[in-house]
Amino acid sequence: MSKVWFITGSSRGLGRSLAEAVLAAGDKVAATARNPEQLKDLLQKYPEQVYPLQLDVTDKEQIIAAVDGAIKRFGRIDVLVNNAGFGIVGATEAYSDEQVRSQLETNLSAPIEITRAVLPYMRKQRSGRILQISSVGGRVGNAGLTIYQAAKFGLGGFSEALAKEVAPLGIKVTCVEPGGFRTDWVDAAAAHQVPEIQGYETTVGVRKTFFTAGNFKPMGDPDKAAKVMVELAGHPNPPVHLVLGGEAAGMIKQANAARDEDMEKWLPVSRSTDADDAEDFTQTEMGRSFFGAKR
C-alpha cells in the first residue's frame, strides 16, 4: 500500500529532492511551500499523487489548516518530514532580534508545532514515521552559526525524547543529520546581512569567507539522501539519529571523542557533587530503567 507523506519545504533543496523521490516511488505527498506555485510542475506530472499546500511553518493557523487539508485529501499521514529550515551566518551579538527569533521559530518551534498537529492522527492510526531534518550542526557547534545550531541541538533532543514517548503507539522518530549537501543552503545562509564586528575575524569571519569565497564544495548528493529517506520510512527498526554524509560522520566522530575525553578527565569532579549517601546511579531503579530502556 502506498504511503502518504507530509513534507515541509518541498519547493527547493533537500525537500524538493525528497518529494520527487517519494512521488517516483508511487507514494502520495502533501507538499508544502510558502509559494505553492513552485510545485506546479510536480502537480502536472503527478496530479493524483501530489497535493500542494501553502504553509509558512511559523504560522500556527496555517499549520493546522495544512495538516487538516492533507487529512481531508488523503485520509491519513504516514510519514511526516519536518524539512523546512534556514541558517544565517554571523556573530551571536551581531544578529538582529528578528534574525534570532526567525531562526529559532523556523528550525525548532515549527517542527515541534507541526509534529504536535500530526501526532493525534498517527496515535489513532497506531502507526507513523516522523523524520526531523536536523543537521550535523545539531551535534557539533561551530562559530558563525550559533542560533541555527542552538535550534538544531534542540530539535535533536526533542526527537530523542519523543521517540521514547511514542514508541508504544507504533510511531517511530528519526532525527536526520546531514552534513553539507549540494543545495543552495550555504548561499542562502551567507546572503543575509549581518554586521561585522571587530574581534571575530578569526572565528566568524573565517566561516563566512569559507562559505562565500567559492572554495566550499559540499560532499553530499541530495538525490542520494532522498533515496535513503524513502528507504528509511519503510525500515522496521530505524535509528533515532541518522547521520548523512561522510563529512558529517567524520565531524561527529571527532566531536564525540573530544566529549568522551573531557567526560573522563572531569569525572571525579562530576562525582564529587553527589550526596554522601547517594547510590551508584546504574544500580538505582531509575538507572536500571534508563540503561535497560528499549525503543
Image (tube, rainbow, N blue to C red):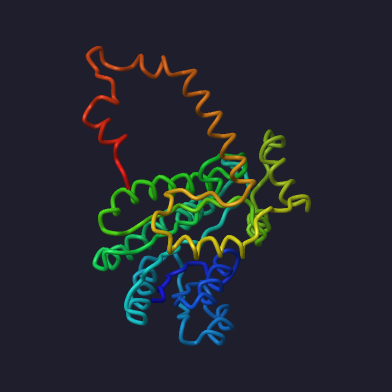
Residue drawn 44% across the image and 47% down it? 156
In the foreground, 180 or 149: 180
Report the number of discs: 0
Decide: is 10 above or below 199.
below
114 to the left or right of 91: left
Q: Nearer the viewer, residue 61 or 216?
A: 216
Up/down of 119 relative to 36, above or below: above
| Residue at image coords 41%, 14% | 268
Q: Residue furthest top?
A: 276
Residue at the image point whose x is 47% and y is 58% from the top: 106
Estimate the x, y position of residue 113 in percent, counting from the top left: 36, 60
**Residue 267: percent from left, percent from top:** 43, 18
Answer left or right for 136 relative to 49. right
Considering only vertical position in the picture, is 187 above or below 201? below
What is the x, y in percent for residue 203? 67, 36
Q: Nearer the viewer, residue 64 or 215?
A: 215
The location of residue 96, given as percent across then percent down, is: 55, 50
**In the rendered view of the protein, which quadrant contains the N terminus?**
bottom left
**Which residue occupies 31% across, 48% down?**
164
- Residue 228 sits in quarter: bottom right
